[in-house]
Image (cartoon, rainbow, N blue to C red):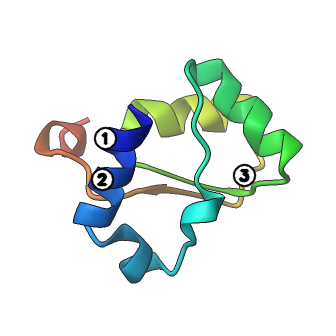
Amino acid sequence: IQERSLKWLHGNNFFAETGFSERNVFFCEKRPEKAKICEKNNIDAFIDDRLDVLKHILTDIPDFKLCLLYKPEKKENQK
């Protein structure tokens, strides 16, 4: 999944469009681990292409400064 995700990020010009560095991309196997990674690394911005992931993060860390839905698939826009 990591390789596919990085390929998607590069293919969608994510790093060029956002100015984010690839070294600031973290991967985990299970959704609950995302909040732990954010807390451990003092991350206050979260970007994903899935609305359900962002909702989960906001539930676990309600004082997040930024959650951004980046280039979601059409089905995500209908939620």
Residue 59 percent across, percent down from the top left? 66, 30
The residue most toward the left is 74
Asked if marks 2 and 3 touch (Cβ < 8 Å), the reply is no
The image quarter in which residue 57 lies: top right
Q: Secondary structure at mark 2?
A: helix
Q: Which residue is mark 3?
A: 64
Q: Position of residue 35 (x, y in %)?
A: 72, 33
**Of marks 2 and 3, the one in the foreground:** 2
Q: Answer above or below: position of 1 versus 26.
A: above
**Earlier residue among tags 2 and 3:** 2
Which image quadrant for residue 29? Answer: top right
Quadrant holding the N terminus: top left
Mark 3 or mark 1: which comes first in sequence?
1
- The residue where tag 1 is placed is 4
Tell me: 29 left or right of 62. Answer: left
Q: Which residue is mark 2?
A: 7
